[in-house]
Image (cartoon, rainbow, N blue to C red):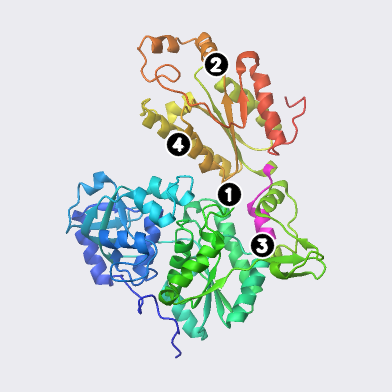
Amino acid sequence: MIEHVVAPHGGSLVNLMADEARADELKQQSRDWPSWDLNLRQLSDIELLMNGGYSPLKGFMNRSDCESVCRSMYTTEGTLWPMPLYLDVTREFADKVSEGDSISLRDPEGGMLAVVKVEQMWEPDLAADAARLFGADNSEHAGVARFLKMTNPVFLAGSVEGVQLPAYFDFQSLRLTPADVRREFTRLGWLAVVGVQTDRLIHRADQGFLYRAALKAKANLLIHPVVDISRSHDKSYYSQIRCYRALMFYFPLHTARLSLSPLQRRFAGPRETIWHALVNKNFGCSHFVVDPTHTDPNAETGDSLYYPEDEHTSLWDDHVDKVGVVPIKHEQLVYVRDSDDYLPASSVDGSQRILTLSETELHGRLEDGKEIPTWFTFPEIARELARAHLPRHKQGFTIFLTGLSGAGKSTVASVLRARLMQMGQRPVTLLDGDIVRKHLSSELGFSKEDRNINIRRIGFVASEITKNGGIAICAPIAPYETVREEVRQMITPLGGFVLVHVATPLEVCEVRDRKGLYQKARKGIIKEFTGISDPYETPKKPDVRLDTTGLTPAESAWEIMVHLEREGYIAAPSDDEM
């Protein structure tokens, strides 16, 4: 049988999985070991480490290797590996562990995945590492912000033994290991393979480019998308994968293979591009599509790319012998109406009429319920997108009212609920602050931490209602900007989110206070009272701002209804409905 021509990085494919007997032994021994629950990034790392996707690495890097990789992209032994591989834990957990101890690594459900033998522990200089990894120390850089915010302060190094790979219950036939993919390539007789690492849908233009690139390289294609597993509760996650599956019918039979990658992006630009190429090399790819937008922190913001495109090429050229993969620069194709064909943008002159559809325009069409042009994407993908991305008037949404106690939130929310129920377009649920406190958060106090937990619980319930096409009306005080933004980010992938600041002044709220809470707070009887002894952070950019001083509850609800109609969430309310 023909062996695949591309050797894994380092020469051989690493397999850290213990055999069945050893795995059972480790499970028994682990009862006395500390356990660390892996986050999503760590789950990605441990899976690729165990299955050989990170070959030739056999464990988490020590301090010298991490620092060397951050500085030069090479380990101390001279292995090219652009991103450090570390197990980061909290100080509280690190205090329970000593060098030489074994730690069991578990998934969020408590299943044991692997064992790490701790060889070294240290606290890195995260700011210095970020500056080297991302070429930036500005927290406005998405990669830097995520690295500094989500990385635990203590790093552990050590060898790894695998017990079992993470379990997936969806699209299991697409969860292929490097060994699985290589066996498939050998069976098919593929000697050259172009790796396509992406997190975006592939429409006609990109499909045309990939087909031409494979022909030019005399190679086949591994479509290897990174699909964010954190969105697995979201229907768009499943829709995205179904779109990839539909795409495969538009390549000639046995010329392309689809496999989902567990890789987690870092937004580190050119060095991350090389890292992706090495991982895909371990999956058997001899060529790799270099698309600067895939690793750039500004790719999804609409801003100009943070890393210039030529930096990817120049950095690759500096390390080409060590990479061992042929780069294929992504080329933009545009639709030329006169010839009814996609052509390289560089070959089209001003006399030819081209049609384009940006991501923003695509989402606008989906929200408005308009058809997606047939020249832009394939009919199966257009149907799938239309099914997954309902127009706004059919989506669920959350209305989140925030303001001081006595501002009028609950009354306005009650009126709003009645108006929306009267319209009968969707089921409506009211999550009032006091009611939620009684039924969901009765054990919580009023410290900042407890208040944030309460708001996150409200956000979670609202996200479930929104996801299932309903309307959630939330009316807590929610004094802190950060957690309000967390709730927005939790809900917006699932439907609409409207932040309403009920901006009634403090002095008006005090006059309205029938329970005497403000008076007790000023006397110090009630501690941590918002607006008196605890701050209220005014929303910077609410969707609607209301001062109920001079408005009736019905008039306030009308203002919100008008906003909902203007944004397309509801039809224009009639006089009878109001």
Q: Nearer the viewer, mark 3 or mark 1?
A: 1
Q: Nearer the viewer, residue 66 or 132?
A: 132
Q: CA distance from mark 3 to mark 1?
A: 24 Å
Label located before the other in sequence (3 or 4): 3
Q: Are marks 3 and 1 in contact (CB under 8 Å)?
A: no
Task: Confirm or deny contact between disc 4 and disc 1 (CB under 8 A).
Answer: no
The CA distance from mark 3 to mark 4 is 35 Å
User: Which residue carries the number 4 mark?
Assistant: 456
- Badge 2 amino acid: Pro
Q: Which residue is mark 2?
A: 505
**Sequence-wise first label, 2 or 1:** 1
How far apart are the alpha carbons under marks 4 and 2?
Answer: 26 Å
Residue 343 x/y as whole percent: 72, 70
Name the residue rendered at 37%, 15% in the picture: 526
What's the amino acid at mark 1? Thr
Outermost residue toward the bottom? 1
Residue 257 drawn above or below residue 113: below
Give residue 318's mark.
none
Quarter of the picture holding the N terminus? bottom left
Q: Residues within 10 Å of mark 4 (few under 14, many from 20)?
A: some
Q: Is residue 252 above or below residue 517?
A: below
Magenta-tinted stretch: 381-392
**Residue denoted by label 1:** 301
Quick check: 346 left or right of 397?
A: right
Question: SS for tag 3?
Answer: helix
Residue at point 44%, 61% (across, down): 168
Q: Nearer the viewer, residue 473 or 28?
A: 473
Gap in angstroms between the C-alphas marked 2 and 1 = 35 Å
Residue that carries the numbered disc 3 in the rendered image: 381
Q: Position of residue 493 (x, y in %)?
A: 56, 46
Q: Is residue 422 visible?
A: no
